Image (cartoon, rainbow, N blue to C red):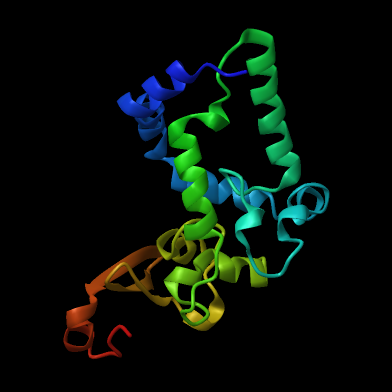
Amino acid sequence: ELELLPWLLDASLGLSARVSGHLERYWQVHFYHIHRMGHITNVYNDAHKFHHYLHDCTPFDAHIFGSGAPEEWLILMSDLALGLGFGLQPASLSGHVLGVSWYNKWGFHSRSDKPALHGDNFHADHHLRHSVNFGYAYPLELVMDTAPKELKGVVEWDGYRMEKVEEEGTVTLRFTPCATAEKALNKTPCK
């Protein structure tokens, strides 16, 4: 039995969203490395492989973090222990976490009708290949050299043509607005 009042207060005042907001500043970099470690051979075989059982992603692959059954089991058991042992509302049932989990199902773990390698299929392409697209979007993938090789260091992302440039041991991401990409760089404009 859960008390409804704390849930309503949290949802209406956005308390867990505020706490989460402070942590989210670093979440994308943190998630990239956690997810990439999940693909190390021994870790992958014992834990994360379950998440990649199907070679395409579906909304059923993802709890809030979309990690896979062993990791999610620990999160859910921790929630149960806190709820049953101390009478606390499980974190997985806060309004904010439920919202993030819902978005994770339809926004991140679903294949778009866009072509492969399009930004809308970023994570779906990860499920097909397993060795690319560990984070949320292409910038970090370009820097870490885990973007699909056929992109050749150039992607369209969030209205920009983004290109990885390596000069004298320095990696730079060059962003050019799609509307001016062809004129500015004398290259193919964004699609």
**Residue 21: x %, y % from top left:** 36, 34
Where residue 74 sits in the image (x, y, percent)? 72, 32
Question: Looking at the picture, how far across and down is residue 110, in whole percent?
Answer: 55, 64
Point out the image quarter for the N terminus.
top right
Q: Quick check: 191 above or below 153?
A: below
To which quarter of the image does residue 129 belong? bottom right
Residue sitting at 43 percent across and 35 percent down? 96
Residue sitting at x 70%, y 18%: 81
Q: Nearer the viewer, residue 169 or 98?
A: 98
- 156 left or right of 97? left
Residue 67 vs residue 3, the one in the foreground: 3
Q: What is the number of callouts on the image?
A: 0
Q: Residue at x 33, y 85 (%)?
A: 191
Residue appearing at x 36%, y 24% in the figure:
15
Q: Is residue 132 visible?
A: no
Q: Is residue 141 visible?
A: yes
Q: Residue furthest top?
A: 86
When the figure is inspected, residue 180 is found, relative to residue 77, above or below; the finding is: below
Which picture quadrant has residue 93? top right
Q: Is residue 121 above or below residue 144?
A: below
Relative to residue 160, is residue 184 drawn left or right? Answer: left
List x then y, in percent, for residue 46: 82, 48
Quarter of the view holding residue 154: bottom left
Give whichever of 80, 43 is nearer the camera.
80
